Image (spheres, rainbow, N blue to C red):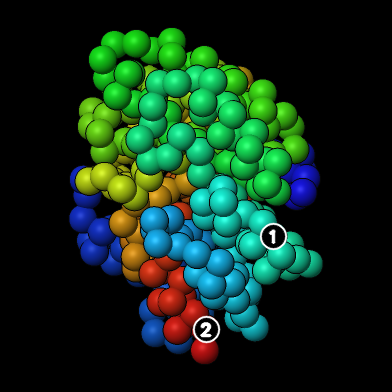
């Protein structure tokens, strides 16, 4: 298992990215350093119902190339052993989803799902927050669920809580759900499952980051993962810049910032060939 203890030390993308790239000179041939950095922050993900062992073997090959490697490969619990075997010795973490994608309010089931993923060999678990119950006014069930899943993870397995921000919609709701997840012990806050619309948005990311800023002011180290529709370098860089506008230039590392994506990796590797 990867020891994560050391890891805790609706806007226009085109307009925002143009500013970012102008400021940082990320155009033309200088795309390569940016692409290499973004690649190291990716959770390379495949969560199709049709995924099988061959899918994960292929994904694992894409995860580590001469150009660089991703932070983690994210898959179903049933395919975690294949991912571990395929990534052996690479230093790439294996992540599995739990309570996914529905985000039910069954605390025991979510905790059992999390524990089963860890038993299968997962280094990280991405669990879906019970957002429908939260929207119905029951804020305590989310706290109990995250606490139970964190208990299953302990301190060696990273817990990312997926808030399904597109369904929460309002920034104040998103931030409140984020605060609950942090109180429950989340190591990371994540925007979306990628299974509902909208996925990630600048507004939602900003609300999660506001909760993270407040948590860090209290000494809690909470990371941020953007996921849901991140397909281009411009989009990924926009969220990276958003994060670093809060925490400083070059502050984003795999231990505190992730990008959940699949198609994005092909674009990044194309820039590094």
Q: Is residue 214 above or below residue 56?
A: above
Q: Residue at x 39, y 58 (%)?
A: 48
SS at badge 2: helix
Q: Position of residue 209 (x, y in %)?
A: 44, 36
Q: Residues within 10 Å of mark 2 (few under 14, many from 20)?
A: some
Q: Is residue 258 left or right of residue 132?
A: right
Front residue of 149/57: it is 57
The answer to whether residue 265 is visible is yes
Which disc is residue 131 wearing?
none
Q: Nearer the viewer, residue 48 or 89?
A: 48
Q: Give the residue at x 27% y 29%.
A: 168
- Tell me the residue at 31%/48% (across/down): 195
- The tally of labels here is 2
The residue tagged with tag 1: helix, strand or loop? helix
Residue that label 1 marks: 84
Label 1 and label 2: CA atoms lie apart by: 26 Å
Quarter of the rendering containing residue 129: top left
Q: Is residue 134 above or below residue 167?
A: above
- Sequence-first disc among 1 and 2: 1
- Picture coordinates of residue 87 (x, y %)? 69, 66
Kindly identify which residue carries mark 2. 272
| Mark 1, other Cα within 10 Å: few <14 / some 14–19 / many ≥20 | many
């Amino acid at each position: 298992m990867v020891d994560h203890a050391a890891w805790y030390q609706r806007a226009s993308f085109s307009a925002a990215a143009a500013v970012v790239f102008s400021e940082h000179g990320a155009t033309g041939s200088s795309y390569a350093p940016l692409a290499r950095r973004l690649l190291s922050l990716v959770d390379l993900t495949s969560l199709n119902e049709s995924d099988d062992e061959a899918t994960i073997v292929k994904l694992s090959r894409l995860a580590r190339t001469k150009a660089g490697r991703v932070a983690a490969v994210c898959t179903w619990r049933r395919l975690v052993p294949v991912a571990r075997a395929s990534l052996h010795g690479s230093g790439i973490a294996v992540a599995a989803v739990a309570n996914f994608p529905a985000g039910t309010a069954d605390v025991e089931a979510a905790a059992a799902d999390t524990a089963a993923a860890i038993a299968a060999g997962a280094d990280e678990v991405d669990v879906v927050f019970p957002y429908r119950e939260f929207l119905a006014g029951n804020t305590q069930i989310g706290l109990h669920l995250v606490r139970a899943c964190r208990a299953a993870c302990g301190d060696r397995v990273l817990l990312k809580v997926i808030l399904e921000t597109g369904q929460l919609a309002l920034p104040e709701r998103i931030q409140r759900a984020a605060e609950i997840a942090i109180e429950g012990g989340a190591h990371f806050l994540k925007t979306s499952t990628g299974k509902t619309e909208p996925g990630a948005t600048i507004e939602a990311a900003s609300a999660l980051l506001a909760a993270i800023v407040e948590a860090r002011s209290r000494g809690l180290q909470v990371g941020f993962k953007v996921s849901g529709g991140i397909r281009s370098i411009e989009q990924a860089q926009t969220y990276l810049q958003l994060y670093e506008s809060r925490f400083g230039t070059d502050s984003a590392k795999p231990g505190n910032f992730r990008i959940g994506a699949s198609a994005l990796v092909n674009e990044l590797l194309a820039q590094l060939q």
